[in-house]
Image (spheres, rainbow, N blue to C red):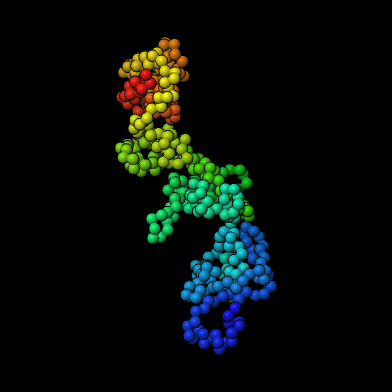
């Protein structure tokens, strides 16, 4: 190489005076062992014969990561340096820099964390893997400066912050108890660096969604409803806070994301646009038609329009008509929801109210017939 080792001091001075482009490298010693203690991996040793003379200052005068990270950590008085295990081979370079700069007594403790691996375990998880497999890899939307393209983040996909932290902690750590769901306070109390694994952890998106679902079920209904309100606003749906909270309580156990409250409960906010008549027609009879016409006409005689009174009157009339209640509940559900889904059907009727229940029955009956 044409450098200060192969040129004379006079040649080097002359080139510097002329402003010749140059870089500054670290001069690695030959065949020396550099050892340090890693909080996760114990004693780690590298022989300098396997390392090259890394560039510290580039020709444009800008420092490389190797020099910048040491100076930044020193100036900021960093006590513990946590980074991914891909930086482990660079550790001896940084340790020698701490030594050469005379700051060795201020050097932080080191911890090289295990990598998050692709779902199949073959290599580090990357943005490309997320794009290919349909899940985010960034905490929040990540865009390229100067462009309108971005990669969707966990936050924008609908992950709750607490669920995201819990999921991330469990990639490469456990407390030995088998417990998986931890509050932030529990994690603060129980976390220990000694329990962090040395090997990488495979990312499982289905497991990540499971974490989010667990937190949705544990989250206060009023808070979830508040988080769900932007979905209603975007769809132009007028809503009442108390009503939205009630719907949230009814459907949240089915949701992996907050925005799925709409998927599982849209029929509480508007009439279903389509009715699955094909699921009803093959077994539809004039007797069932007459049952619903008579039952709906008697709603005004109910002591209260609630789930209990509706179910009692439903079963009593079905028995009187000689029809099994089970043969009638599915058509009733489809009348209210548009399909074979949703919470307890009489609770749905109570929630949307008497007038709306009658209107949906009257709308569906001609379609079934």
Q: Residue at x 51, y 74 (%)?
A: 57
Q: Residue at x 61, y 44 (%)?
A: 177
Report x, y in % for residue 122. 60, 52
Quadrant including the N terminus? bottom right
Asked if residue 255 is positioned above or below residue 192 in the image, the reply reads: above
Q: Residue at x 56, y 89 (%)?
A: 10
Residue 98 visible within the image: no
Asked if residue 258 is positioned above or below residue 351 in the image, the reply reads: below
Report x, y in % for residue 142. 44, 55
Q: Which residue occupies the foreground of this view, 131 or 136?
A: 131
Q: Which residue occupies the foreground of this view, 297 or 78?
A: 297
Residue 146 visible within the image: yes
Report x, y in % for residue 231. 37, 42
Q: Residue at x 39, y 41 (%)?
A: 228
Report x, y in % for residue 249. 42, 34
- Position of 253 with respect to 118 (left or right) is left
State which quadrant residue 331 falls in.
Answer: top left
Asked if residue 309 is positioned above or below residue 45 in the image, the reply reads: above
- Position of 247 with respect to 184 (left or right) is left
State which quadrant residue 49 falls in.
Answer: bottom right
- Position of 239 with respect to 27 (left or right) is left
Q: Which residue occupies the foreground of this view, 357 or 123?
A: 123
Quadrant including the C terminus? top left
Asked if residue 359 is positioned above or below residue 291 in the image, the reply reads: below
């Amino acid at each position: 190489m044409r450098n200060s080792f192969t040129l004379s001091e006079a040649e080097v001075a002359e080139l510097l005076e002329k402003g010749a482009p140059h870089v500054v490298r670290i001069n690695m010693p030959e065949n020396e062992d550099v050892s340090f203690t890693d909080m996760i991996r114990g004693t780690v040793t590298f022989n300098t014969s396997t390392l090259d003379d890394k560039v510290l200052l580039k020709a444009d005068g800008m420092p490389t990561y190797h020099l910048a990270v040491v100076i930044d950590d020193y100036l900021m008085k960093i006590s513990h340096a946590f980074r991914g295990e891909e930086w482990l081979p660079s550790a001896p370079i940084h340790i020698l820099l701490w030594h050469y700069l005379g700051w060795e007594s201020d050097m932080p403790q080191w911890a090289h964390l295990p990598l998050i691996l692709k779902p199949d375990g073959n290599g580090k998880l990357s943005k490309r893997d997320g794009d290919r497999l349909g899940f985010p890899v960034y905490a929040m939307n990540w865009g390229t400066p100067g462009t309108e393209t971005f990669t969707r983040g966990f936050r924008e996909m609908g992950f709750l912050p607490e669920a995201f932290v819990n999921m991330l902690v469990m990639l490469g750590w456990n407390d030995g108890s088998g417990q998986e769901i931890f509050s932030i306070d529990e994690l603060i109390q129980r976390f220990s660096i000694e329990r962090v694994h040395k090997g990488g952890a495979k990312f499982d998106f289905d497991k990540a969604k499971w974490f989010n679902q667990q937190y949705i079920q544990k989250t206060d209904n009023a808070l979830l409803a508040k988080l769900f309100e932007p979905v209603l606003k975007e769809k132009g749906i007028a809503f009442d806070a108390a009503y939205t909270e009630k719907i949230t309580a009814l459907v949240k156990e089915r949701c992996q994301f907050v925005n799925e409250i709409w998927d599982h409960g849209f029929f509480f906010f508007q009439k279903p646009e389509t009715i699955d008549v094909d699921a009803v027609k093959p077994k539809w009879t004039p007797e069932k038609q007459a049952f619903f016409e008579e039952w709906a006409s008697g709603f005004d005689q109910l002591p209260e329009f609630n789930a209990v009174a509706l179910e009692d009157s439903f079963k009593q009339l079905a028995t009187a008509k000689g029809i099994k209640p089970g043969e009638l509940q599915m058509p009733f559900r489809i009348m209210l929801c548009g399909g074979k889904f949703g919470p307890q059907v009489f609770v749905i009727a109570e929630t949307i109210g008497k007038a709306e229940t009658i209107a949906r029955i009257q709308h569906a009956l001609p379609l079934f017939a």
